[in-house]
Amino acid sequence: MDRLFDPRHVRRAFSRAAAGYDAAAALQQEVRARLLESLAYLDDRVPSVVLDVGSGTGHAAAAMKKRWPRAQVLALDLALPMLRQARRQAGWWRPFARVCADARALPLAEGSVDVLFSNLCLQWVDDLPAVLAGFRRVLRPGGMLLVSTFGPETLAELRQAFAAADERPHVSPFASIAQVGDALVAAGFRDPVLDRDLFTLTYPDLPALMRELRAIGATNALATRRRSLTGRARFAAAAAAYEPLRDADGRLPSSWEVVYAQAWAPPPGAPVREGGHEVAAVPLSQIPIRRRPSP
């Protein structure tokens, strides 16, 4: 299967953005705060192992370590410079482990995690059901999954503006809330609850928006992207296509749709959906085998 994203480009983009990420990531901070509020659904349960996938500079990992001081908290990110920044959040009084790894191949044992948290990371993966299946693998039965990702209305204005100037895509496709729900069910999660927010940020001009996207590592990582720089003529055409959208204050709007999902890992032996059918996962030792007598 052809890749949608270039993972090396994703790693490089976030590595370059690490030092200045926190100063530019106001929306990401707001979404993180809203997602962390959902930890209240754990009631009084205290997890032993907490995993933050796509942890970035480590603020969510630090918040969860503060909430559960005795838990082992793991901050996992694809970009090593992000994890170096995350070290500042850990400190000597509430340290948490940092792991440089890919969300598509978690280097953790099956059933070893009680809470898996992932804020605005899943929009960078090709195969959402496969990644969620990996999340289910590492979660203990009854473990909690909390994720957020961008929905299809994200950067709709930018997508439209560049479509008027260039035949190559400049904005990633994003999964809808229905697709996220379907992927959770396909991966075998139970009792999913989904929600969405639509944020509108504004900018003085298109270059300001593009600078912010670079600052948070959200550059064009599509495998089919144009490999050369966007020429002045194409950029000018995109800027001209964006101009009619200016609001009453004379600023350019940028839409950001955020999808939130909460779900639970099923009990042991729960069926997994494959191709729309329930397939029971039963240990071979529990399957009665009737042997034919020897002729």
Image (cartoon, rainbow, N blue to C red):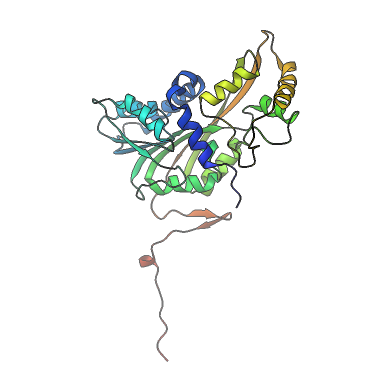
**Residue 97, position in %: x, y?**
30, 35
**Residue 266, position in %: x, y?**
42, 47
Question: Foreground: 45 or 236?
Answer: 236
Question: Foreground: 149 or 13?
Answer: 13
Q: Is residue 152 visible?
A: yes
Residue ID at (65%, 12%):
251
Q: Is residue 158 left or right of residue 17?
A: right
Q: How many marks?
A: 0
Question: Foreground: 131 or 86?
Answer: 86
Residue ID at (68%, 35%):
169
Question: Foreground: 60 or 165?
Answer: 165
Q: Is residue 254 left or right of residue 119?
A: right
Q: Is residue 72 left or right of residue 203?
A: left
**Residue 35 lies in quadrant:** top left
Vertical arrangement, residue 190 with respect to residue 41, above or below: below
**Residue 231 lies in quadrant:** top right
Q: Is residue 261 visible?
A: no
**Residue 210, position in %: x, y?**
60, 23
Residue ID at (65%, 32%):
170
Please identify the residue farthest to the top as the structure is shown.
249
Figure quadrant of the C terminus = bottom left
**Residue 121, position in %: x, y?**
49, 35
